[in-house]
């Protein structure tokens, strides 16, 4: 079973996660998701050029910042470790 099978957004085709109408209100839907850390971690492993949409409650711009900020990246890693243990 993949983390995607437990995602709160699974089956939510009614939401536009990747288009021009993408907003932080969509990202807020991710906050209570049980697999948010796994989703964010997967997104952070992608190349920045192939990184549109909301992943793990973050926008593309926020993920660029996390990739460049070691302390932010460490916080994501710690959160992921807690989630999977």
Image: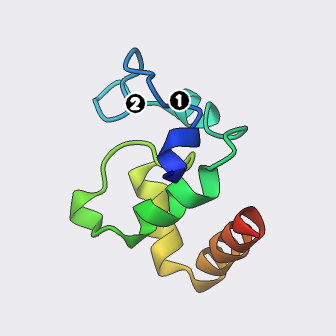
Q: Position of residue 20 (x, y in %)?
A: 29, 29
Name the residue carrying label 2: 22
Q: Residue furthest bottom?
A: 70
Report, in whole angstroms, how far the alpha carbon at label 1 lies from the one at label 2.
Answer: 7 Å
Residue 78 relative to residue 7: left or right: right
Residue sitting at x 69%, y 45% = 34
Residue 18 relative to residue 28: left or right: left
The numbered mark at residue 26 is 1
User: In the image shown, does 8 or 29 lie closer to the viewer?
Assistant: 8
Residue 30 relative to residue 79: left or right: left
At numbered mark 2, what does the secondary structure look like: helix, strand or loop?
A: loop
Residue sitting at x 55%, y 79% = 69
Q: Position of residue 75 (x, y in %)?
A: 70, 73
The numbered mark at residue 52 is none
Report if the CB atoms under discs 1 and 2 are less than 8 Å apart: yes
Residue sitting at x 48%, y 31% = 10
Which class describes the residues within 10 Å of circle 1: few (<14), some (14-19), or many (20+)? Answer: many
The C terminus - image quarter = bottom right
Residue 50 picture quarter:
bottom left
Q: Position of residue 11 (x, y in %)?
A: 44, 24
């Amino acid at each position: 079973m993949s983390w995607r099978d437990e995602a709160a957004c699974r089956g939510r085709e009614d939401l536009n996660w990747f288009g021009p109408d993408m907003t932080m209100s969509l990202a807020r839907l991710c906050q209570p998701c049980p697999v948010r850390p796994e989703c964010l971690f997967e997104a952070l492993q992608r190349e920045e050029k192939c990184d549109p949409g909301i992943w793990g409650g973050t926008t593309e711009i926020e993920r660029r910042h996390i990739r460049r900020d070691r302390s932010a990246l460490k916080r994501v890693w710690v959160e992921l470790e807690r989630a999977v243990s």
